[in-house]
Image (cartoon, helix red, strand yellow):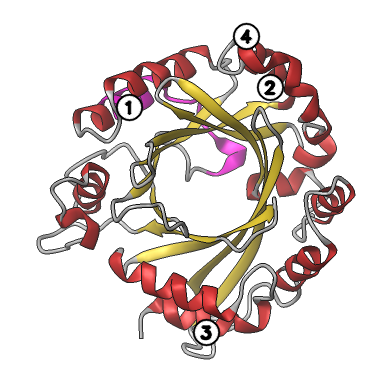
Amino acid sequence: MRILDSCLEELKPFLQEPLVSPADVVKVSARAASVPEAMQAFYLECRLSPPGPQVDFLGSVVRRRGEGDAVGPAERRDDPAGQFLQRWRVGAAALRSPAVWTELDDNPHVGPLSNIHVCVDSSYRSPKDGLPPFDRTGASLLLRELAEASVVSAQQLAVLDDCLGALPDSARLIHVSAMTARSPVETKVYLAIPVEKFRPWVTLGPGSGWANQLERLEPWTTPELNGSTLYCDLTFRGATYQSIGLVFGQPQIPETGDDHSRERVRRKLVQEGLCTLAQDAALAKWVGAPLNPVCSFDTSLRLRRWLDIKVSMTKARLSSKAYLGFSPHISLF
């Protein structure tokens, strides 16, 4: 049995409708058969608002060096993102990138090609209390490597360069995502920026056309919810921005009262009508104790669970998603 299937079986007591149904688990397992077996962390991405059954799958791929380490989607000649992923896995591409994620959408309109998230911050895995300055030159070189591999177009590269060039000195560009399985193709950037610099940066830069709508996001940009650093992603098609999302992730927890259950964010989601009580009960189940239990299928492993949340703004509305994270790891105690 694959490690992912073993994990999903182990997680059944913590997966609850209306977030994740037994049928969703079966679909995730079937879709994941096309991606590398060697992964070290996973997410089930669940839509909260607008409500509806949608569970996407994300996996962090482990780099391997050597021959014959094939990746299913990469065998398609018309799949540059999948080919790039295969080359990265064997150390033949993007050596500065410490991490690559693959994403499989639960969407009948999505094709068989690859969606990938490439980390362009070479210090991403460094201890947060000793993080070196962001390497803009290295990130720029990675962006060009993505363009040379046809993972992003020349037009998208120009937009990414604009984002990188406009970042404040204390901000970091973390991931660039090529959603090539979607039609039309979407590109995303995921970055970290000091809370107080978010609105000025968006107003003067990528979201300048949305300046009069940013007040809808302002209640979600407080230090109480984010700590000192705000994590956000921007989605665009061609050169047109589609959405701005605020991500409440793991790096913020030490500055927000070690709130591993994300209770503050969850309470606000319910208050703002972005999460139902039934959905919140399912989220509470996911972050219920124990968060790091011993695996029954391998007692040398523990299966850690965590919760990230995203609130996104388009010109039409606010929406929200929950990211149910899990990762098996070796534990001798």
Specify which label sits upstream in the sequence, 1 or 2. 1
Q: CA distance from mark 3 to mark 1?
A: 38 Å
Q: CA distance from mark 4 to mark 3?
A: 48 Å
Residue tagged 4: 204
Dominant SS type (magenta): helix
**Left or right: residue 211 compared with residue 205:** right
Q: CA distance from mark 2 to mark 4?
A: 10 Å
Q: CA distance from mark 1 to mark 4?
A: 23 Å
**Which residue is painted at 36% across and 19% down in the image?**
137
Location of the C terminus (image quadrant): bottom right
Residue tagged 1: 143
Residue tagged 3: 9
Provide residue 318's location: percent of width, then percent of height.
72, 38
The kind of residue tagged 4 is Leu
Residue tagged 2: 198
Is 185 situated above or below 60?
above
Is 311 situated above or below 7?
above
Q: Give the secondary structure at mark 2.
A: helix
* Nearer to us in this view, 255 or 201: 201
The kind of residue tagged 3 is Glu
User: Mark 2, residues whose alpha carbon is within 10 Å: few (<14), some, or many (≥20)?
Assistant: many
Q: CA distance from mark 1 to mark 2?
A: 23 Å
Q: List the single residue furthest toward the front.
A: 109
The kind of residue tagged 1 is Leu
**Which residue is painted at 44% across and 14% down in the image?**
162
Q: CA distance from mark 3 to mark 2?
A: 41 Å
User: Mark 1, residues whose alpha carbon is within 10 Å: few (<14), some, or many (≥20)?
Assistant: many
Circles 3 and 1, Cβ within 8 Å, touching? The answer is no
Specify which label sits upstream in the sequence, 4 or 3. 3
